[in-house]
């Protein structure tokens, strides 16, 4: 069955963004094989704000070839935006129905895995409903001191199974966990 | 020169304790070689509250042999308690002088490395003054959702150099960083 995968960067103190949305600490390393990850997914899930910020992002002409290739691969995926606002966009499907039901529906369909992109509010909903099958968390060697935490408003403890650890040359360590239901 | 080492357990969301001081998520694995770590240090630094809670802790008779051996090794170290209160204790030295000056003094002395035990307030002082040379952070496969964060009240970002990653069979991953001044 298709899996819902959360893949994101966090600081060593567990933030996904600084207090003003800073993500300049985030490292894109060529040994991370993010393209390998992207080849295993065919659908990306966004919250409205994240979609507006990143859903159609185009890197600068000065960006590295890897970065350009990654964004091209991202933009070739099917995009679903969870939003309470009615909207149309030729590049994404907007959904305002119940998230757990929608995910159950996706999982019944044939296809590759599904990447839960963010932001924080959508991730919280997914965590609370136990909808994330795989957590891929890239711990960066930076302590911000303040920001938007990855995990918030949890109603109960979440216990995970560690399945893999990847160390990258930049000092980023990727921790991969399975959800333990 | 002797190094000041912070060695502690954090949850995946960066807490060192739950909201009510819970540390029951904390795993003591026999492949962690905590005794190896202890053999490299000769001094332990505590805040007053941590010292009162853990400074003379004795494990239950039912505790594992490893746990008993670890506590015995801990109690054989020189203990320094930073406290604004005047106190006497035959098992520890109390210090109410300036922490950075005291650490500079220790570093000039011959000896093994120094373990900064905690708690949170003392750790914050050390982080803010750049007094920690090595961060050994054991990331546990548990998300608590709330608690006492390892890093708080930072005045500026802290950038670290990853030096080692140890994966333990329990699912704990130890990340070892050097301070980048």
Image: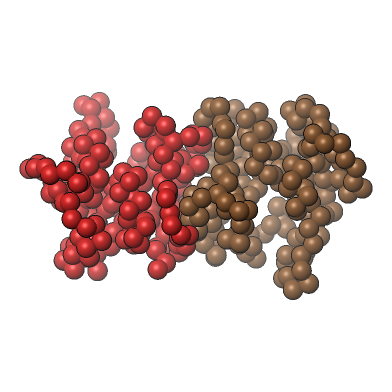
Chain colours: A brown, B red
> Is A56 left, or right, of A14 in this rendering?
right
Q: Residue at x 78, y 58 (%)?
A: A57
Q: How many labels were placed on the picture?
A: 0
Q: Is residue A154 above or below residue A171?
A: above
Decide: is B11 above or below B111.
above
The one of A111 and B135 positioned closer to us in this rendering: B135
Q: On the rendered image, what quadrant is the C terminus of chain A found in?
A: top right
Residue toward you, A17 or B24 = A17
Where does the image place residue A110, in percent across and percent down from the top left?
Answer: 83, 36
Left or right? Give the position of B50 relative to B22: left
- What's the residue at 76%, 65% (across, down)? A59
The image quadrant that residue A151 belongs to is: top right
Q: Residue at x 86, y 36 (%)?
A: A86
Q: Nearer the viewer, residue B23 or A53?
A: A53
B9 relative to B112 in the view: left or right: right
Q: Is residue A157 visible?
A: yes
Residue B111 image position (x, y, % from top left): 17, 62
Q: Can you see residue B165?
A: no
As drawn, the residue found furthest toward the bottom would be A62
Residue B110, image x, y percentages: 16, 66
Considering only vertical position in the picture, is B107 above or below A53? below
B5, above or below B86, in the image: below
Q: Residue at x 67, y 59 (%)?
A: A33
Q: Position of residue A147 (x, y in %)?
A: 55, 49
In the rendered image, which quarter contains the N terminus of chain A? top right
Report whether A176 appears left or right of A121: left
């Amino acid at each position: 069955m298709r899996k819902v995968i959360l893949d994101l960067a966090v600081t060593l103190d567990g933030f996904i963004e600084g207090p003003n949305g800073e993500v300049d600490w985030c490292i894109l390393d060529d040994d991370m094989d993010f393209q390998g990850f992207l080849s295993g997914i065919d659908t990306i899930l966004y919250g409205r704000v994240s979609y507006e910020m990143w859903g159609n992002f185009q890197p600068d002409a000065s960006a590295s070839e890897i970065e350009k290739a990654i964004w091209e691969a991202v933009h070739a995926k099917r995009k679903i935006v969870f939003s309470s606002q009615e909207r149309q966009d030729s590049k994404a499907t907007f959904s305002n129905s119940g998230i757990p039901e929608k995910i159950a529906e996706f999982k019944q369909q044939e296809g590759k895995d599904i990447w839960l992109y963010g932001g924080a509010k959508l991730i919280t909903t997914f965590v609370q409903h136990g909808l994330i099958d795989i957590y891929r968390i890239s711990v960066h060697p930076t302590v911000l001191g303040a920001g938007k935490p990855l995990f918030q408003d949890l109603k109960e403890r979440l216990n995970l199974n560690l399945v893999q650890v990847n160390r990258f040359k930049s000092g980023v360590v990727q921790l991969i966990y399975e959800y333990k239901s």
